[in-house]
Each structure stands twice: as structure tokens, then as C-alpha cells.
Amino acid sequence: MNSEWPLWEVFIRSQHGLAHKHVGSLHAPDAGMAIKNARDVYTRRNEGISIWVARSADIHASSPGDRAALFEPSNDKVYRHPTFFPMPEEVKHI
Amino acid sequence: MYAQLVETGLKKVRDVADMSPEEQAFQARVDADIKIEPKDWMPEAYRRTLIRQIQQHAHSEVVGMLPEGNWITRAPSLQRKAILMAKVQDEAGHGLYLYCAAETLGVSRDEMIADLHAGKVKYSSIFNYPTLTWADIGTIGWLVDGAAIMNQIPLCRCSFGPYARAMIRVCKEESFHQRQGFDIMLALCRGTDEQQAMAQDALDRWWWPSLMMFGPSDAESVHSAQSARWKIKLLSNDELRQRFVDQTAPQADFLGLRIPDDKLAWNEARGHYDFGEIDWQEFHEVIKGHGPCNRDRMRTRVKAWEDGAWVREAALAHAEKRAKREAKQAA
């Protein structure tokens, strides 16, 4: 019997107002144990106020090989940045 | 130095002329300090070398819990017991970060544990020495964790993302380990004659094995040269060892302890400490399995794994049963 526990990815919110950040992974038999284990492995020094765990199998990722094509649409839309528009110096608050 | 004996599987450093376009692109990224992530293309030799190096690092952390765990029940005060437990827990945590980093390269936890138990992969030679007194615990924190920090800080900049990020976490925690050890040494060296003698005895036994942690001179090593090109080994063994001696000798002076090396002396011209010859035969014997504790360490690890099998299986069975029950209730 394969008794290898499934892999989970761990995300920690370190302080109120911040987003959860990926900190690593661990093996656990279910979500409850994954959270307890994440507490023991990733927050020994009060690094977090909230833990998310997601099965690694449920994480979908873009392929590095497709990076150029996937992100191409934004390459030539420099007008999305405010710096594209020079403003007269006399005009305030813009 | 967890790469004390990590072979790259290559006979010479890869030449750009021999590389495929993918490998050239890969090498260019490494040269430009762009991190390689798990799903990126990488040469098979890079993947295999990292799998070995990272897992040996992980095994070292977990086996390293044993010599220190040996003194948890006999720490001289409740506070020192709690502190030592926290240190040993950290080592477990470090092992876990590293196992997960290795797994991103396509090897499973079960495979890595099986290879360790079969002797196919190693752990750092230092953990095959016994902890005979409480002073050994101080000496380990001071010297062994000190040597580990020396090696791990450059690795925070290594080319493989998950390994570099794991090293950053580890380094943050490792400084407590070294201070914990030095704190113990301070207490002993400021204590009675017997305590000072115990501290000196521990230093006498752990100094040379600590220097051996950095591995033999690798000026001629093809594996080290290739690993340097791949940025998974940032400094040579000799460089790291020299830095360690330069840093540690003044610390021993402060403690009033004598490093057991007649040739140890500050060399003004070089700007470094000179030190004596290391007995590499002892190192190779220990790596081969003939150190004082090799068999004991492996027996303990194998027993822990085998005795824990029912727990791993029961936890999975319980999780499955609960999931089925919840699905039925929802239906």
C-alpha cells in the first residue's frame, strides 16, 4: 500500500493587511493535519497570523516555455503606465 | 559541505560549444543570476546533482537531530532543555524545507528515505561522532552550526529557486543555533575548573571533525568546477574552511580555550590563520561507514521509519474514511 501522504502548498499571511505568501510545501494526510503541520514547520517564530493550504495537485501553473507568448499582449502597451503621459508642470494634482 | 561527495556525473566541465540551444539558454540564465525554477528546462546532470545535494543536506539535518537529542533529558536546567528542544525542532524543520525543495525536482520522499537507508546517499560526516558530555552540545552549536552557516549563506544565492529560498529561511534560524552553543560554552568557561576542563575536552574532540565538514581540497575537482559553473556551489571547500578558521580562532581565544592544533598561527603576510594538516583518512573512513556512530545513526533512522509506518498508514486511512463519511452526509 502506498502510504505516501499527498503534497500540500502552504501560504502564510504574516500580518493584517498583507496577502498570503507561498512559503513552501509539506506532506499531510488531510487538510486539518496540513494546517497543524504548517503551523509547526513554517511559523515557529510567529511568522504568521493565518495559514492557507492547498493540495499541490490543485495548483495549476502557466508553463515557463509559454511565457513569451502568454505575456506578449502587455509588451507594447506602455500607455498603461502613467509615465507615458508627460503633464505640464503648471498642472497640479495629476 | 552537504556536497562533501556530490558527483555531477560529468567528466569535464560543460563547454558552451558542446551545449544544445536549450542548455546554452539555461547557462546564460545562470550566468545572469536569473533563478531556475522547477518547471524550467535544465540539463539532466544539473537536476540529478541538485537532487543528490539537496537531499543529502536534508538527511544531514534529520540525522543531526540525534546527537543533540541525546542530551535533551540531561540538560542542566529547564530553560536549557526547552532551548535545546527548540533547536532540535528547527533541525527537523530545516530537513522538511529541504526535502520539499528536492521533491520539486521530481524525486519522492519515499525514494529519498529508501536511498538514505540503503546507503546510496550520504549525510554530513560530522553527525557520526558521539555527544559524550553537555559541553559537546555547546561545541556543536558553536562549531558545527558555525560551519553550516559558513556554507549556507552563499547558498542563499544559488541558482535553483526553491533551494535558495529554503536557505534564506534556514539562515535566519541558524544564528540562534550558533549563539545557543556559544552561550553554553561561555557558561562553562566562566565556571568551575571541571566545567572549563569539560569545555576544553569537547573542543579537543570536535575541532578536526568540524574542519573536515568542508570536505577535502577541491582545487582539482571537476565536480566542484562544474557545480561552480552551475552556481550550486558558490565557494571552494578550502575558501570556506579558511574563513571558518579565521572567524573561530579569536572566539576560542575569548573563551580561554586552546584549539588543538600546534600549527595554528596568525600569518600576517597572508592575512589569514595558518593551520595544520587534516587527517583525510579519518574523513574517508567515516564517510565509508566506519565512524564511531554510523551504524547507530542508521539503525535509529531505519527503526524510526519502520516503527512509524503504521502511523502514516493509519493517518491516511482515517483521512479517507472521514472524507467518505463527509461525502455521504453531503449527498
Image (spheres, rainbow, N blue to C red):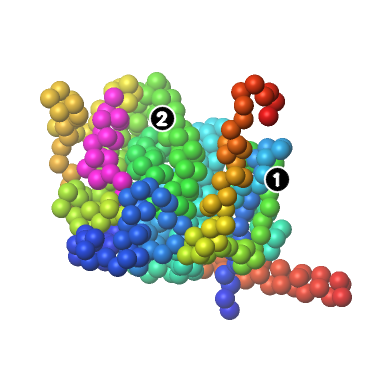
Protein chain holding label 2: B
- Residue B245 magenta-drawn? yes
Residue B162 seen: yes
Amino acid type at image mark 1: Ser
Residue B323 as seen in the image, left or right of residue B268: right
Protein chain holding label 1: A
Judging by the rendered image, the residue that carries numbered circle 1 is A50
| Image position, residue A34 (x, y; %) | 66, 57
- Give the answer, above or below, for where A79 lies relative to B226: above
Who's the residue at 61% across and 23% down the image? Answer: A89
Using the image, tell me which numbered label, if any, was put on residue B182.
2
Can marks 2 and 1 be said to lie on one chain? no
For the residue pair B88 and B93, the one nearer the viewer reads as: B93
**Residue at the far left in the pictured view:** B269
Residue A37 as seen in the image, left or right of residue B123: right
Who's the residue at 43% across and 25% down the image? Answer: B187
Who's the residue at 61% across and 67% down the image? Answer: A57
For the residue pair B212 and B45, the one nearer the viewer reads as: B45
Residue B103 seen: no
| Image position, residue B207 (x, y; %) | 27, 38
| Image position, residue B212 (x, y; %) | 26, 46
Amino acid type at image mark 2: Phe
| Image position, residue B108 (x, y; %) | 49, 68
Magenta residue span: B232-250
Query: Which secondary structure lies at badge 2?
Result: helix
Quarter of the image containing the C terminus of chain B? Answer: bottom right
Who's the residue at 37% across and 24% down the image? Answer: B189
- Give the answer, above or below, for where A23 lies relative to B276: below
Query: Which secondary structure lies at badge 1?
Result: strand
Q: Quadrant of residue A19?
A: top right
Viewer-side label of 2, 1: 1
